[in-house]
Amino acid sequence: MTVNKTNSTKRGIPGSVGLANLGNSCYMNCILQCLVHVEPLTNYILSSKKKEQKEEEEEEEEEGEPSSLSSSFTKDINRTNPLGSGGKVAEAYASLIKAIWSGQHTFLSPQLHEDLNRVSFSSSSSSSLSLSLSSSSSPTVTIIHDAKSIRGKGGKDPNNGGGGDDTLLACKTWAHHLLRNDSIIVDHFQGMQRTSLTCPRCKNQSIKFDVYSSISLTLKGRTDGRPICLYSCLQNFTGEEQLDDCNAWYCSNCKVNVNAIKCVKLWTVPNILVLHLNRFTFRSSKRRGGGMLQSKIEDVVDFPVDHLNMEPFVHGPKATSSNNDDGSGGSLNAAPIYKLVGIVEHSGETADSGHYTATVRNSRDCRFYKCNDSQIGDATDNLKGSGVYLLFYKRENKGECKWGGMDRIMMLGGGKKGTGGSAASSSSSYQPSPSILDSEGFTMVVGKKKKKKSVVLL
């Protein structure tokens, strides 16, 4: 058991349980509190087995012991992933979720922190798992490594620097991603963005698709004291910027480095949208000895609580919702409308110091609760404080769709009719046209006389 139960004799509110600070663990506690109320993930962990699980629950011998893990969760844990923990972290997280929703505790002392410290991760993932204050959702990354399914070699990345059909390249990129990433996290937490680099001289363009789990938004402090609008931050994120000399891009057509025009567009948005408000800025010190100076933007950000409309920022094909595993499905072509699930706030002057608290919407009683480590109370204050750092949003049920709608797009196969399916069936059923993609999965550059397969990587 990875949870030290505390106050077991006092009944608590299911889902609203304090987490003890085990030493600089306030940031992780806040992330956990937000994840607790992400319904797709929590329901996946706690969903009951049919008949056999009911029999197991009747045989629980310890008083206050929460219900068993769902059979699908236990079956899906990947214990052989070299980037994971052999399933230890996933099981520790699941045990914590069970205890939080049991209604039998007012606060807990989770040992998930120690489980993370005991696990030896590869150097490639250590930075993601360090729980650094600038990270947006580190605990989620850890759970991904335990839950993801490695179904084969990843192969070569299909992204390229040439032209071609965006939908085709997006489907190819997502299918490549699914070769080594297939889990409940991928289903609900990940979307895709399209990045283009355009030469200002000849308009030659390079296009690349990337998978994301959170969106980091740059804040620009205001001098008039007015709040920063979240929609303005999203517009800036998806706007154009010209690269400086330090980030010059090599244009294969002009054969020189150019200050390319960079543009990032959201191709799909996941059911669970995590927005990171980047309040910390860094600049080099002019004093002798150098070093970096930090500053924090304390401006209030105005964000929607019940109706965040992401439709203006999504540039991929409008996805039709497919059936979920239980046979239910969202409305066709439903707009990506979100409601707020959780907030993480930072108090302090730098990213290396201060304290983190969370405000979460209990997914059962729909009330907001303030979480300050072991202390839980009603969120009576204004939710839009000057320290808001992370925003967790959940897509409305009628608009929920697997993989941000990519399952439906891939099954349609560029206009072919089809129905939704599993990760394996969806990714395998999508067959790119060999006349457009070469043997390595790159889109051929059209219009060149000799080097038709020339590729420029981002």
Image (cartoon, grey):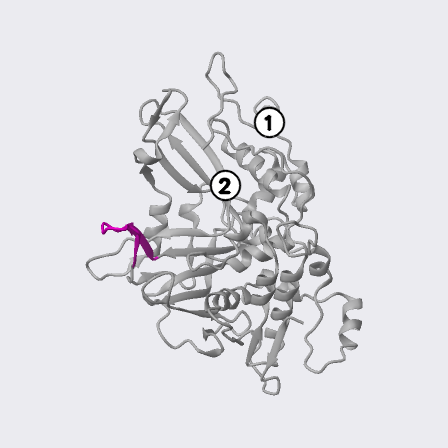
The magenta segment is: 279-295
Where residue 433 appears, x then y in whole percent? 61, 26
Q: Magenta span has 284?
A: yes
Determine which quarter of the picture holds residue 153. top right
Q: Is residue 165 above or below residue 268?
A: above
- Relative placement, left or right, of 125 versus 47 is left
| Name of the residue lying farthest toward the front | 289
Where residue 172 appears, x then y in whole percent? 58, 35
Q: Type of residue at label 1? A: Glu
Total numbered labels placed on residues in the image: 2
Q: Secondary structure at mark 1?
A: loop
Q: Secondary structure at mark 2?
A: strand
Residue 114 visible to the viewer: yes
Quadrant of the frame with the N terminus = bottom right
Q: Residues within 10 Å of mark 1 (few under 14, many from 20)?
A: few
Quadrant of the frame with the C terminus = top left
To which residue does mark 1 refer?
A: 440
To which residue does mark 2 refer?
A: 210
Q: Type of residue at label 2? A: Asp
Q: Which residue is found at the position 47% from the left and 12% from the top? A: 449
